[in-house]
Amino acid sequence: MELHKESSHPGAFLSNASRNLSSSSSAFVSASQSPFFSPRSPPPLLIPPQITILPSQITISPSDASPCHAISSDASLAHRRNKKTKKKNSPISLRTRSVITVSSSTNRPRSYDVYLAYHGKKVSLLRFVNWLRAELEAQGISCFACDRARCRSSRSQSHVEKIMNFTTFGVVIITKKSFGNPYTIEELRHFFSRRNLVPIYFDLGPSDCLARDIVERRGMWEKHGGELWVLYGGLEREWREAVEALSRAFDLQLEAGCGNWRDCILEAVSVLAKKLGRRSVVDRINRWREKIEKEEFPYPRNENFVGRKKEISELELILFGDVSGDAEREYFELKTRHKRNIAGTSTNKCESLSENGGKGKEPVVWRESEKEIEMQRSVRGKAASRNARRKRPKAKILYGKGVACVSGESGIGKTELVLEYAYRFAQRYKLVLWVGGQSRYIRQNFLNLRNLLEIDLGCDTYSHEKGNFKCFEEQEEEAIARVRKELASDIPYLVIIDDLESETDWWDRRVITDLIPQLGGETHFIITTRLPRVLGLEPMKLSYLSGVEAMAVMRGETVAKDYPLVETDALRAIEEKLGRLTLGLGIIGAILSELPITPSRLLDTINRMPLRDLPWTDKEEMLTFKRHSTLIQLLDVCLSIFDHADGPRSLAARMVHVSGWFAMSAVPVHLLALAAYKFPKKKHGSKLFKKCSSLFRRSRIKRSESEAASVLVRFGVARISTRPNCIQFHELVKIYARRRGSHRVAQAVVQSICVRASVSHSLDHLWAACFLVFGSGSEHVMVELNPTELTHFVRQVALPLAIRTFITYSRCNAALELLRLCTEALESAGEALVNSRGDKWRLKRRLRYCFRADCSRSDEGFRLIWQEMALLKATVLETRAKLMLRAGRYDAGDDLIRKAIFIRSSICGDRHPDTVSARETLSRLTRLLTNVQIS
């Protein structure tokens, strides 16, 4: 959060228009606005400074308002966006000027559930207060927050005092500077006397707030202690009463430190809700806590995480603009950077750090608009213009804007880095949201956040009779806007977009900035990618681990073992052969931990493994594995170990082979095992590890599904997911599996998904199966199904997937495209089935008697298959027509439903319930189409 400038501009008495307003909203107003500006106030108007006296009310211009520091849910955001429009001599933003009226019939201000008092301009304090206020409002608890030390008007001070008198509970944020502030002392005494004080200790504890220690400057009070009442001319007795009041509030000991912000805020909201008698709020918070405990993170924390202290400190610096706690010591390890001021208003105190900021370089200009954030370079003079023409200026890392990009090659440890950061700083955010960045799935993954954010993205029902409908694009935009709105609130979230493949969406080539809200707010974004630049920003380049760190990763659990010099040299040789790739180092450490094998023997085994000549179709994949060819040999070693432990083509090895055809998200173990069982075994196993029969710790028996998954996790080939009974494979492992496999493996995956996959739990894998069956873009069809299998696949996978995608997530175009591909596939399969029956004469004869009861027994199977495919095609056509109706595309829906009626009436008859239902849909479409044509 940005700092707000103090001002000595005189204030005027302000209040709400009526005392009868609902207490469900709050007034938390920017420092540059009226301290009592309510979010439900009238729209902004530009008026000159004046006071107008009316018989029934007094109208006061906000241009004379006090700069009392308070913040509101919508006004605080407007304050941050519109600092550039402020006048030099007026603390009121032009965008937020409004006429606020005060009824002369009463002096009683509006009452609030909570009065939130704080003092200070520290960025972390303002962020905490803003979050607490927003969380209270989100739970329906009205809140008024104010820093009275910044109210320079006696009339505004009087109004705040009246609000304090009519507030149900008083929450006072206690910091080191609070005891030297007369207003905090007064607030403590006031709420304690009314027995409604709720103190929250910020960066200190109740045991630290002893009057004797503060006066004598003991411990932490060496700098901020002393006879603090002298600073403002107060009385020692009143000051001591206020400090001692904290010790008497023993039933409420809420402490907010760097590692428990989230818990503290939720506990504070729960305590206040209980005192207000709102049990439903407490139950809702408890249910939410139980939910995020299981679903917040995609993977458990890596307890053996090694190194990356510098990178984590730099991430904190990029996102927050500063470092705190233990990270302050790591801050000095960062590369030295020169500071450059960000161009803009004089009130903006944020600074940008540039890596190459020297003489002759142009300063980075950060320009913020309502729609986007962009960074440019200002050009000074002709020499700068010539330099700009010769060399295009590069965008630099921006600090304190809430967005960080981490770039590096695949397998270097980007996901591990951001996962560790997320676990360390999770308490500074209400929720950590993980989004897979694959271009085919990024939009679906973004909309999947609805589950954790508790947002309804379903398509609304509109009155088609009155012409009230939205096109498909508008419905999709509305669904995305709901998620963006929640992320743009004053409640901080951490959104991690992992492995971003492209800045554009695969479906419609939209840029990812259409998905995420405006940068620079309370929500932070971390993007991991292999791209050289994202969002026009220079990413943080992730380098390899140091030699000591790489050695620690390879030793793993055997780190306490003191290897002789020969074995240490073997580890260094393995490190060099793997190119210091973190993924390969982790697999080496897992093998050394699971098997009683020395590093030198493992190195010899890797060298003796023949290097496979895998077929490559993607240039980037080919270059990656060409640089790390030893990784292919290492994966072959792992599969050979699995085969030798459980026999030729063990379940664990086959699970690796089929993993490449699933989506990038975690795969249910039972689904993976079913695909592995459908994948045929080899007749002859590998003979390479026959001499290593005593190496594996377990006996040579057929393992169950869970045991096979456990073996993959223990050997570092897969990683466990927080989703129950799910594991996930690294992208490089999946590429390796696809190149070693064939279409038979892909067909086994499709069959397993068709049998066991659930549309509510395996959405990404259902889409992956559809891509294999129907093709995707320029890619050809990987799996060809026979008519029976295709009918089963469309009915069990494609049709439910399209309906859920449309109804639940409002992804209209994707759902309709899938249904169109289903229609074409069924038509092609039907034509192929008919053509395979013989010449045209025989075909006509068969079609003539196709639906007669006395057809020959040899034609029975053909008739049933053809009839089933035709009826399924009619169902798909009817579904498409109903979806077209939701967007007002009545003409297209009319054509589709007529085709469905023709098929059903030909096969089932006109009186069949399905035919009657289709005719009702046709009647509705015809009526709506007629109304549109008439109007």
Image: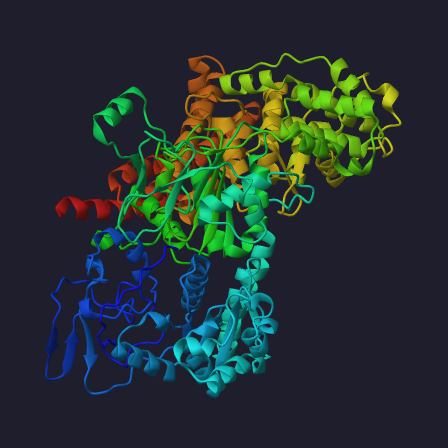
Between 182 and 78, the one lying in front of the other is: 182
Q: Position of residue 453 (x, y in %)?
A: 46, 55
| Color scheme of the displayed model | rainbow
Between 848 and 64, the one lying in front of the other is: 64
Between 217 and 99, the one lying in front of the other is: 217
Between 15 and 906, the one lying in front of the other is: 15
Question: In this rendering, is residue 475 above or below 621?
Answer: below
* Displayed quadrant of residue 417: top right
Residue 905 lies left or right of residue 56; in this view the side is right
Image point (70%, 30%), residue name: 587
Question: In this rendering, is residue 804 above or below 12?
Answer: above
Q: Position of residue 797 (x, y in %)?
A: 52, 38
Q: Position of residue 330 (x, y in %)?
A: 57, 44
* Displayed quadrant of residue 683: top right
Image point (59%, 41%), residue name: 309
- For the question of whether residue 683 can be seen, the reply is no
Query: How many discs appear?
Result: 0
Residue 315 lies left or right of residue 56; in this view the side is right
Question: In this rendering, is residue 215 above or below 288?
Answer: below
- For the question of whether residue 600 can be seen, the reply is yes
Residue 50 lies left or right of residue 151; in this view the side is left
Q: Which corner quadrant holds the N terminus?
A: bottom left
Q: Position of residue 832 (x, y in %)?
A: 47, 19
